[in-house]
Amino acid sequence: MLNAHDILETIHMIQDENLDVRTITMGISLLDCAHSDLSVTCDKVYDKITRYAEHLVRTGEDIEKEYGIPIINKRISITPAAMVLAACDNKDAVKLAHTLERAAVTCGVNFLGGYSALVQKGFGPGDCELMESIPQALAETEHICSSVNIGSTKAGINMDAVAMMGRIVKQTAELTADRQCIGAAKLVVFCNAPEDNPFMAGAFHGPGEPDVEVNVGVSGPGVVRAALAKAGDCDLTAVADIIKKTAFKITRMGQLVATEASRRLGVPFGIVDLSLAPTPAVGDSVAHILEEIGLESCGGYGTTAALALLNDAVKKGGVMASSHVGGLSGAFIPVTEDAGMIAAATSGALKLEKLEAMTAVCSVGLDMINIPGDTTPEVISAIIADEAAIGMVNSKTTAVRVIPAIGKQAGDVLSFGGLLGEGPVMPVNTASPARFIERGGRIPAPMQSLKN
Amino acid sequence: MKRAVITVIGQDAVGILAAVSGKCAEHKVNVLEVTQSVLQDLFAMIMMADVSACDIPFAEFGEQLAAMGRDRGLSVQAVNAEVFDAMHTI
C-alpha cells in the first residue's frame, strides 16, 4: 500500500522541484529511404517520418495529462543523414535538410536530430558534402540539429575532420550572427557518440538500431538538490546514497513513461537515458547541486571531485530502475542552460579550463559555451581535439558545442531564449595551434582500444 | 482495476472532501481510501480511487477536478497510481 508521505513527496517533486521527463525521442531509421534520385529520397524520408511520428506529440501530451508528469520535449532522431545521402547522385544535402524541417513541423516536434555524419576513421560517400552543408542547413532551418562524430576509442581521432569542424562551427555561427549565432548551438562535435542518445543537439539514430524505437531522457537536478538540502550536514558517503535513491525514483518514472509511450505508439522501447539535464529555470541546475554538496561556487577547486561523485551516484541509482539504460547517462554541464553555471561563468569562478577538467568525469563535454567571435577556426579545432582526446583515452563520450559569438568579446552576452538559455562570452586561450591542426591525418587509437 | 491517486493541497476549508467525492460520484469513480496529512503547514488530503468505471476519459476527469480546485484556491491533481508504485516500490 502506498503511504501519504511517498505520495506527497512525488507531488512536491513535480510541483516545486521541476521533476519532469525531459524528452521522448522517437528514433527512426531512414536507411530504406536512400535512392539514387535525391527527390525520391526526400519524398520517402518525409513520408516515413510523418507516418511513424504522426501520433508522437499527441501521445506524449496524453501521458503527461494522465500521469501528471510534465514531458517537456517530443523529438525525432534519424539515421545520420550522410548515410542516406550516400546513395544519391546529386548530394545537395541542404535540400534534404529542408525536407527534414518540413517533416519536423508537420509532426509538431521540438527538434529533429540526425543531420549527422560519422567520420571517426575517414570520410565515406556523402560525409564531406553533408559536413560542408551544415552552416547553410542550420541557418535555413529551425528544428534541425546536427552532429559529427570525429573520433572514438576504437578508431582514434580523424584530425582532417577536426580541422574541417573548427571552420564549420565558425561558419555556422557567422551565418546566424543576426540571430545570436544560434546555428552553432544546434551543432555538436562528438568523440564516442552514443547511437541511442535522446538528447539534443546530439541525437541521432545509429545504424545498429532497429527500424524505429522510443528513447526517453529523464531530468530532475532540482529534485536531487532539494533532497540534499533536506539531509543537512552528512558525510559524502551519505550524500552519494541520497543521490542514488533520488536518481532511482526519477528513473523509475522515466521508465514508466517510456514503457507507456512504447505501448501506446506500438513502437519498441529502446533505452532510458539517466542524465541529469538542467534548464535555465531557477531550481533546475546541476551547478546548484555541486554547491549544495559544499562548494561556494561551481568552478572552484573541489568541483571536479563533487561532479565525479554526482555522476557516479546518478548512474548507480538509475541503472537498477530501468530495464535498458543508454544514451549519455550522467550529469550534463551545459553552461548557458544552467542558472548556476551562468552565474559562475559571469562571476569568473567558472573558467574554460575547469570545464575541460569536469568533462573528464561527467557525461558529455564542453557544452553550450560562448566564445569570442574572433576565435580562429584552428583554436576551435584544437578545443575539439583536446576534448576528443579525453573521450578517446577514457572510453567515454565527449563533445564540443561552442558558440563563437560573432562581433562580441569576452564578457558580452549571447541570449538564445528557451531551453538553450543565455550566458557570457568566456575568454579563450589564443596561443596558436595552427601548425598542429594543419598536419591533418589521424591520431592512432590508444592502447585502450585493444581489448580483444 | 485502474487506480488513481487524487491529491488536494491548500488551505483547509469546509466542504473540500464533499466537493471532491461529489465529483467522483458524478463520474462513477469509486473512492477506496482517504487520508489527511499536513505538508509544510498546508492541508493535504489524499484519496485512492478506482477509476475503471469512470464515464469520461481520465485526463478530462483530472482536468475537471483541477478546475474545481482552482475555483477554491486549492491544488487538486488526479494521477494514475502507477506513478507512485513505480517510484516508491521495488
Image (spheres, rainbow, N blue to C red):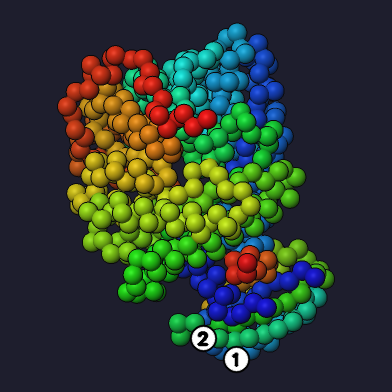
Q: Residues within 10 Å of mark 1 (few under 14, many from 20)?
A: few
How far across and how far down the image is residue A268, in percent? 71, 43
Q: Residue at x 41, y 25 (%)?
A: A445
Q: Residue at x 80, y 75 (%)?
A: B28
In the image, taking residue A64 as reference, residue B51 lies left or right, namely: right
Q: Is residue B80 above or below residue A125?
A: below
Q: Residue at x 35, y 35 (%)?
A: A390
Farthest residue toward the top? A89
How far across and how far down the image is residue A36, in percent? 65, 11
- Judging by the rendered image, the residue that carries numbered circle 1 is B14
In the image, taking residue A395 as reference, residue A180 lies left or right, namely: left
User: In front here: A392 or A44?
Assistant: A392
Q: Residue at x 49, y 82 (%)?
A: B39
**Residue A145 visible within the image:** no
**Residue A240 visible within the image:** yes
How far across and how far down the image is residue A187, in percent? 42, 32
Mark 2 vs 1, N-terminal side: 1
